[in-house]
Amino acid sequence: MVVFTAMFKVRMFGRENVPDEGGVLLLSNHQSYLDPVLCGLGLHREVDYMARDSLFTNNYFAAYIRSLNAFPIQREHADTRAIKEIINRLKAGHVVTMFPEATRSRDGRIRTIKPGLELIARRSGAVIVPIVIDGAFETWPRHQKLPGMGHICIKYGRAITPEQVKNMCKESREGLVDEINRRLRTMQNELRQQYGKPLFNYELEDTLDS
């Protein structure tokens, strides 16, 4: 952890928002291949995470990432087996990381997250903690083969309780998804403002996309 933190000059905020016990669903934006490690870097708990199924075709590499608590998911369609696995791990008290954008960012911005999250949240009864990673895109963008040096910040947001999840889902089908989108984007711009980076105008982008 010390070498990783020093190499990429990682700074972490809000780790106290992650409960010390019980099922926790970490929802993070996705900027680089470093993200699964970054999400659990400063925590005192082991973290499970999904990885695309193609990464498990090589037996040696599959054994390595399984040792890091990874499990496969098929990204081409709704993978009910992976969804059940996530719910079971959360019910068993694990910490599971999800990247609800489903793919790495092309420009560092947070894209609208995919539907289906509310099903996992409601059935697992887990606490949700939103996470924002900023700077990993500049360090290892998707078009670059190897990572470079850089400054990476990780911010753990306020936890969302199971009761709050129920209330958000009652308000509308997209209530929870909309709230997670809002929190992630707000947290990212707070980090960028803190370090003097240009802010992303998500309101303008949503207007153009609508």
Image (cartoon, rainbow, N blue to C red):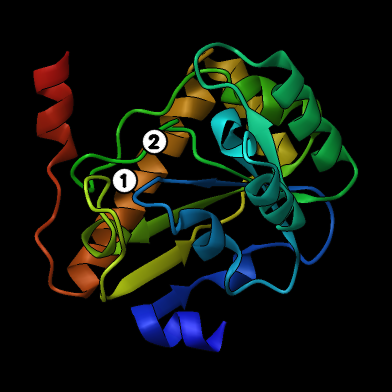
Q: Is residue 89 left or right of residue 2?
A: right
Task: Classify residue 104 by image quadrant.
Answer: top left
- Which kind of residue does numbered mark 1 sit on? Arg
Residue drawn where x is 59% and y is 12% of the image: 78
Q: Is residue 4 left or right of residue 17?
A: left
Locate residue 139, reporting x and y percent.
26, 65
Residue drawn where x is 35% and y is 55% of the image: 187
Q: Quadrant of the N terminus?
A: bottom right
Q: Is residue 149 left or right of residue 38?
A: left
Dot 1: what SS?
A: helix
Are there few (<14), some (14-19), or many (20+) residues within 10 Å of tag 2? some
Q: From this view, report whether residue 39 is shown above or below residue 108.
A: below
Dot 2: what SS?
A: helix
Mark sitting on residue 53:
none
Residue drawn where x is 83% and y is 61% of the image: 21
Measured Cα–Cα span from mark 1 to mark 2: 6 Å
- Read off the residue under disc 2: 181
Query: Given contact means CB atoms under 8 Å apart, are the residues at marks 1 and 2 in contact?
Result: yes
- Read off the residue under disc 1: 185
Locate residue 201, reporting x and y percent.
12, 42
Locate residue 62, reporting x and y percent.
68, 45
